[in-house]
Image (tube, rainbow, N blue to C red):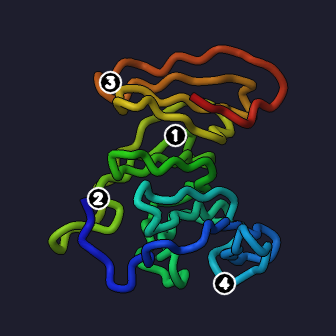
Amino acid sequence: EYPPLAGTMAEGEKPTLFVANKFGNTLSKIDLETGEELLRLNSCTNPHELATSSDGLLVALACYGGRTVDIFRTTDLTKEVTIDLGENARPHGIVWHDSGNIYVTAEGRQSIFKIESPLGFLGQPPKLTEYSTGKLGSHMVAVAPDESTAWTTDLGSKTVTRIDLAGGAEPISITVGEEPEGISL
């Protein structure tokens, strides 16, 4: 659980689309009813994927051109926090799980991260746990509802990898074809 935010989403707010503009290094907020871009702000270098919190108050952006996940308020795109995943992370695929945890691939590290308490809690920073895939280009991620298992598509290795998040068993990979990207559970 993260602490309440000032200026949270108003009841009855219109349906909204968020867009990571990877070539413009920006994040956009678009009104789905009118198609109007309501807001566009600078983000990070080469943002790729994003995920919203289950309450709709926050959007997390994977900064593929670097090593961070940045979290913004959905109301005004104010940046709340930057989470540093370490050298050569190149975060890409991202899921904001209903539990409140964020899962993100780190292509440059051949791994995924679990980010607990993404906004920090009681003055503590977010807790990061890294799980190795051992595969090139761990690109997108899907996570089981009970958070026991995650799966990645691994572009460079031409595989899908199952990661045991609960018990620590070694990852298991199978070859699936040329440059697998999308994944859904």
Q: Name the mark nearer the viewer: 1 or 4.
A: 4
Sequence order check, earlier mark of 1 and 2: 1
Q: Kindly identify which residue carries mark 1.
A: 111
The residue under label 3 is: 168
Q: Residue at x 63, y 78 (%)?
A: 43
Instruction: Please tell me whether mark 1 or mark 2 is closer to you in this view.
Output: 2
* 112 in relation to 77, above or below: above
Classify the position of the C terminus by image quarter: top right
In the image, 133 versus 75, the foreground residue is: 75
User: In screen coordinates, is 1 left or right of 47?
Assistant: left
Whether the residues at callouts 4 and 2 have beta carbons within 8 Å, the answer is no
Residue located farthest toward the front when viewing the structure as drawn: 12
SS for dot 2: loop
Q: Residue at position x 59%, y 32% from top?
A: 152
Q: How many marks?
A: 4
Q: Residue 117 has which mark?
A: 2
Q: Amino acid at mark 2?
A: Ser
